[in-house]
Amino acid sequence: MDNGIPADGSAPRGGRDVFHTECSARQMLDHVTSRWGIWVLLRLHEQRPLRFYELRDRIGGISEKMLSQTLRNLVQDGLVWREVEPDTPPKVAYGLTPLGGGLCGHLAAMLDWIEANAENTGDGAQPAGT
Amino acid sequence: MDNGIPADGSAPRGGRDVFHTECSARQMLDHVTSRWGIWVLLRLHEQRPLRFYELRDRIGGISEKMLSQTLRNLVQDGLVWREVEPDTPPKVAYGLTPLGGGLCGHLAAMLDWIEANAENTGDGAQPAGT
DNA sequence: CAGTATCCAAAATGATACTG
DNA sequence: CAGTATCATTTTGGATACTG
């Protein structure tokens, strides 16, 4: 995955250059805004912990491969924790870390805003911003 | 682009079902979290209005095709306005609508949070959330 | 300048089968 | 149950050339 870093070697211009580099902030952003990241986060925000199959069943259309991959990314980012109970059959639980909880605050707020403001599109009529 | 709507026809489960449908909220979310959407929005948030080539130059690595496409999406969502001055050569300016400004508030807040909290990843140590 | 059209490459995603 | 491996497909993105 490319990250907006100029391929020609030119320096990125303007603020927020943090996100034009290969750093953990950029990684986190990519993971969160990835196809399934936001939904995994939101499900765990609604209810945690959840087991692997519970997440899969609550997120429509996600494949095991993508769930697994998304989860791995989020765990690596420190947004989600993973706990294995050594049973047979194995039981694995996932939940939001304090960090993940913090992010989900922003995420949920944004989603709520979109939900509330997205009706009036296509024409020129926009209500107030925030 | 698929939207997490279950392909098997089963009903989506849990809250936020709005985003499991083909609605304007979902469209907006997809456009904002698209590869370049967030950067276009942020640049316009920093400084507006901007012309096409100014945006292109300020967003490292974006192609004209993608800029054009992203812009079209955001305009359609009502987040960005577009103004053509009938000159030769043509001058076109883009800026945030009040709606777009509202969204960028949330977006910028989230980005700031990520920027501030993304260092400590990979291990188990996370600071407090929000 | 501000795009659009076309074609190609790369990356993400999905279905399926398989393992501990 | 909780994944991983593999392969095919879909999507996305980019380079380039062309238009008003």
Image: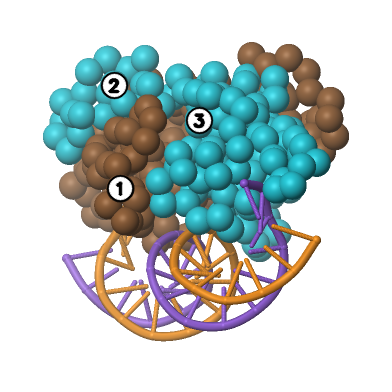
Chain colours: A cyan, B brown, C orange, D purple
10 Å crowding of disc 1: few (<14), some (14-19), many (20+): few
The answer to whether dots 2 and 1 both sit on one chain is no
Q: Secondary structure at mark 3?
A: helix
Q: Chain of mark 3?
A: A
Report the residue at 32% width, 17% height from top. A129
Q: Nearer the viewer, residue A118 or A49?
A: A49
Please give the label number shown on residue A92. Answer: none
Q: Amino acid at mark 2?
A: Ala
For residue A78, above or below residue B69: above
Residue at mark 3 to residue at mark 1: CA–CA distance? 20 Å
The x, y position of residue A76, in whole percent, is 75, 41
The answer to whether dots 2 and 3 both sit on one chain is yes
For residue C19, above or below residue A94: below
10 Å crowding of disc 3: few (<14), some (14-19), many (20+): many
Give the labeled residue for mark 2: A116
The x, y position of residue A15, in whole percent, is 62, 33
Report the residue at 69% width, 40% height from top. A92
Can see residue B85?
A: yes
2 vs 1, front mark: 1
Give the labeled residue for mark 3: A42
Can see residue B40?
A: no
Q: Amino acid at mark 1?
A: Ser
10 Å crowding of disc 2: few (<14), some (14-19), many (20+): few
Q: Are marks 2 and 1 in contact (CB under 8 Å)?
A: no
Give the labeled residue for mark 1: B10
Lower sequence index among marks 2 and 3: 3
The x, y position of residue A83, in whole percent, is 75, 35
Q: Nearer the viewer, residue B103 or A55?
A: A55
For residue A130, above or below residue A87: above
Report the residue at 29% width, 42% height from top. B11
For residue A111, above or below residue B28: above
